[in-house]
Image (cartoon, grey):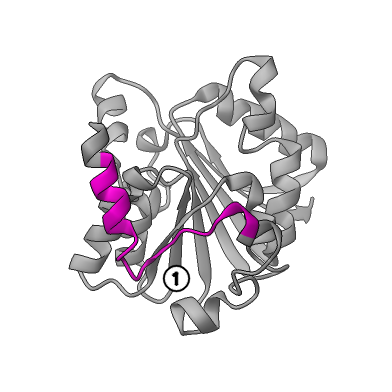
Amino acid sequence: MGSKNKLKRFKENKTFVNVIQPTRDEVLNDTLGLKGNWHQFFFKNNNPIVLELGCGKGEYTVNLAKMFPQKNFLGIDIKGARFWRGAKTALNKNLTNVGFLRVQIELIDLLFSENEIDEIWITFPDPQIKYKRTKHRLTNIEFLNKYQKILKPEGVVHLKTDSEFMHGYTLGLLHGLNLEIEYSHIDVYGTNNAPKEVTEIQTFYEKQYLEKGKKITYLRFNFSSV
């Protein structure tokens, strides 16, 4: 994407009512006014709130919103030029249960109150295979602690990825923490019991992975002790 195109998208994002782009100071100093108030001030209803972390173009966020109109969906990514597509699509289709938040994922516990979130989706994250990159791995222990803090006690985390490494790493971590794994499969298209939201929604890149014969893994867990 050219720099001119990016600037155009950044400018258009500022006009979208479904996009929130706080400054780092607003997040760190809690002056945005949305923490603990997402139902009241942003979605304007009391429906469950679901986050997609690293939402990219927002394909999963938008399609989940279509599939579950009784829930609110918020795509989170630091790259606003990417989720511009999802935000624009949501507006064009009059999807009022969709929003996008431009922020670093490591700051999410500063943007949501305890027990404010019902579900978290992590779709095709960078597995950060090299050891020195583990701090950026979205299912490492530090991120898990943040997720547990903002999720309701019965809240769940979904991990859908083309990386068997990421799937295995997360599974091992969950077993070590004695957390409840609700569903786990290393090939969701090779089984007949995968949830519909896992197999019926495919991103652009996921379709490419499948064409190359890559397996897509899925894991769903909560923070209850086994």
| Percent x, y of residue 82 | 33, 43
Asked whether 11 falls inside the magenta stretch, the response is yes
| Percent x, y of residue 177 | 81, 40
Q: In which quarter of the image is residue 86?
A: bottom left
| Percent x, y of residue 119 | 56, 60
Can residue 11 be seen here? The reply is: yes
Q: Number of marks in the image?
A: 1
- Decide which of 84, 7 is in the foreground and name it: 7
Residue 135's place in the image compared with 112, above or below, is above
For the point 32% across and 57% down, the residue is 13
- Decide which of 119, 7 is in the foreground and name it: 7
Amino acid type for the residue under numbered disc 1: Asn
| Percent x, y of residue 163 | 49, 25
Residue 90's place in the image compared with 190, above or below, is below
Residue 19's place in the image compared with 143, above or below, is below
Q: Quadrant of residue 128?
A: top right
Horizontally, residue 73 falls left or right of residue 149, namely: left
- Decide which of 118, 54 is in the foreground and name it: 54
Say few, some or many: other residues with alpha carbon within 10 Å of mark 1 (under 14 / 14 to 19 / 20 or more): many
Q: Which residue lies furthest to the left in this view?
A: 92
Asked whether 120 falls inside the magenta stretch, the response is no
For the point 30% across and 32% down, the residue is 205
For the point 23% across and 24% down, the residue is 211
User: What is the secondary structure assignment of the residue under circle 1?
Assistant: strand
Horizontally, residue 205 falls left or right of residue 140, namely: left
- Decide which of 20, 121 is in the foreground and name it: 20
Which contiguous range is marked in magenta? 6-25
Q: In which quarter of the image is the N terminus?
A: top left
Which residue in the structure is indicated by mark 1? 72
Can residue 1 be seen here? The reply is: no
